[in-house]
Image (cartoon, grey):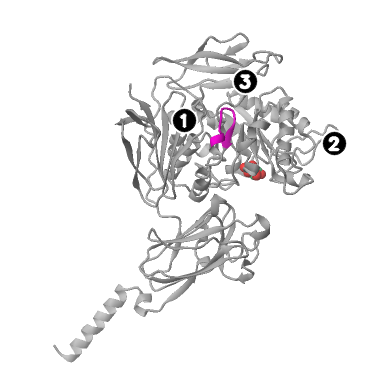
Amino acid sequence: MTKSTKLRLLLALLIGLSSWFSPDLFAQTAQSVYLDDLDISSVQQGWASATARKNLRNKPITLGGKVYERGFCTHAPSEAVIILDGKALTFHAVVGVEDINADLAGVKPVIATIIADKKVIYTSSQLISGKSQATIDLPIKGVKLLELQIEGVGGYSHTHTSWADASITYLGAKPQMVPYPSDDKAEILTPKPGPAPRITGPKVFGVRRGSPILFRFTATGTKPIKFAVKNLPEGLFLDANTGQLTGSLGSPWNIITLTCNLEVEASNAVGTTSRNFKLVVGDKIGLTPAMGWNSWNCWAMTIDEQKVRAAADQLVNTGLADHGWSFVNIDDGWEAADRDSVTGILGTDQIKFKDMKNLADYVHNKGLKLGIYSSPGKWTCGKRLGSLGHEVLDAQTWAAWGIDYLKYDKCSFSAAIPVSPPTHYWHQFPYQVMQKALRGTKRDIIYSMCQYGEDQVWKWGHEVDGNSWRTTDDIIDTWASMRNIGFGQREAMPYTKAGHFNDMDMLVVGQVGWSDKLHPSRLTPSEQYTHISLWCLLSSPLLLGCDLTKLDDFTLGLLTNDEVLDINQDPAANPAKVIRQSAQEAIYTKTLEDGSLAVGLFNLDYDAKSIKVSVADLGLSGKYIIRDLWRQKDTGTTSKEITCRINRHGVALLSLRKQP
Ligand code: GAL
């Protein structure tokens, strides 16, 4: 081979190599990128969206008195996921709680964790606003998936945190910020209802003595379905075609609680079925958690009458109403700008809601119920007029309209009281005032307290007649938010009882968006199964927060599984128990009225894995039939243990019933 051929070959080899390698690598020049220049809209966090180069209050990023020009800010808990090609070199950031938090929420510490290819490579100490920040410099050579996580210590959420100066040096492809790469399939587990009638919905209903009853028996199966009720007391009427129960029982001077044991029958061309039903006439309402829809998580302040009518139509048209979804609740945004100058009545925003009474009639004619929203403060959270000083008048107005449910949201109330921070007395006070006002209407109005879990409301919510009380701040459609709320209920859990429930906030499945711009829930399919299973096991109200006109088959499947919904609506309303809980997995149980045990095995880990629990650890002994509730199938028997393979962030929801 001549010298010139050798040279040509060498050149070809170099050119070949240079086109084979990326130009950056060939050049071997390290580059650097600030993470705030990447797509930070994919950051998952507890509330709102991450911000670049400014903190969440649109002020300069400031940690421990030092201002940073670069970086991004999140509400804890948060997670940023960065895809690398193995050729990144270093990660640098200063992480901490924004100085602004010192005067906002008190000093709520957080912990930052960095995970490289599912292995923890860095954990900070507890970071405190204004006091401690962590400077991080890590080699990340070979890493393909980098996760930056911040958790509030003790599950506290909403802390404003910053990854100041966050940057990566790299040789190969530019790092990309993405949602967690998931290969989760939207598998529909719920079997389609068969043609034979099957009675659905709650097995118990409470009505106050003398109040008009509004309850509809529901069933699935080929239509038309006819209903009949055995032992129906005098004074009550059943519409056999719709299942609607009306009338009233007892008189105000009765002091006893009367339980009417009824037998409901549903029949269609295929067959007949029956089920026991308890009507409890006394003092208590809302004996099982409310199920329905609320306007906030989809429309927020853009709600109007057309959207409410559409939601009511869709509860019926999609068949959801046949599974017990019955409330149509209007959240903030319905209120007029001023009270009537003569009567003091707070009417509706006339551009959005022409006639609330007419709307209530429309909703009632469909066998559904209408809910409304207000605040004990001067202003609601959406800056509309609240009920402060007009509680009795407002309650009467709502009753005259035909309202069946009130969400009473604390919002600006703290500004109206003489003490700060509010004492226990002042936490209870506004809720007592409205409780008396509602009682005075002689209409059964479900009372839903929304004060974000302040003053450990789960300990006293029942004393002020709350049918439910929010235990946390607002949910959003991220794993971080749903997981933090869902698995952060251990303290509140034991206080659940019939008629008084911990409210873990509205559901974030389907199309949500808090505006008129909606997007599909960012929860993966497995996370959505976890969400519904957990809300059912913990007896939270089930209020859909999505646009019901855009329901897909997967979401419908999630919401129409009667065996899963029965766990939520179980008449015993027993509190759930924690059998085991760690950052990797959780096992919760709930004893049902028929003696069986509902068991949720939750995989909180990065990958699919098997979770095992012994029958003894579940507090049982003997032989049990295992039923997969999502698939509605018996899967075997056990007297020793159960093992289930579960998707990342997914669940196995089972029931164990004693083998005869
Ligand atoms: C929040 C409440 C939300 C929604 C909103 C309305 O305080 O938690 O669920 O009701 O107010 O302004």
Mark 1 in CB contact with mark 3 (< 8 angstroms): no
Along the line of sight, which residue is nearer the eye, 452 or 55? 452
In the image, residue 495 lies in the stretch drawn in magenta: yes
- Determine the secondary structure under disc 1: helix
What x and y, as percent, mark residue 486? 51, 43
Instruction: Note whether residue 214 is visible.
Output: no
What is the three-letter code of the residue carrying label 2?
A: Ser
Snapshot quadrant of residue 341: top right
Nearer the observer, disc 2 or disc 1?
1
In the shown orientation, is residue 405 left or right of residue 224? right
* Residue to which mark 1 is pinned: 567
- Determine the secondary structure under disc 3: strand
Ligand 1 quarter of the rendering? top right
Mark 2 in CB contact with mark 1 (< 8 angstroms): no
Q: Is residue 70 above or below residue 441?
A: below
In the shown orientation, is residue 354 left or right of residue 617? right
Mark 1 Cα-neighbour bin, 10 Å: few <14, some 14–19, many ≥20: many
* Residue to which mark 3 is pinned: 207
What is the three-letter code of the residue carrying label 3?
A: Val
Measured Cα–Cα span from mark 2 to mark 1: 49 Å
- The magenta stretch spans which residues? 494-502
In the shown orientation, is residue 566 left or right of residue 405? left
Q: Is residue 51 above or below residue 523?
A: below
* Residue to which mark 2 is pinned: 341
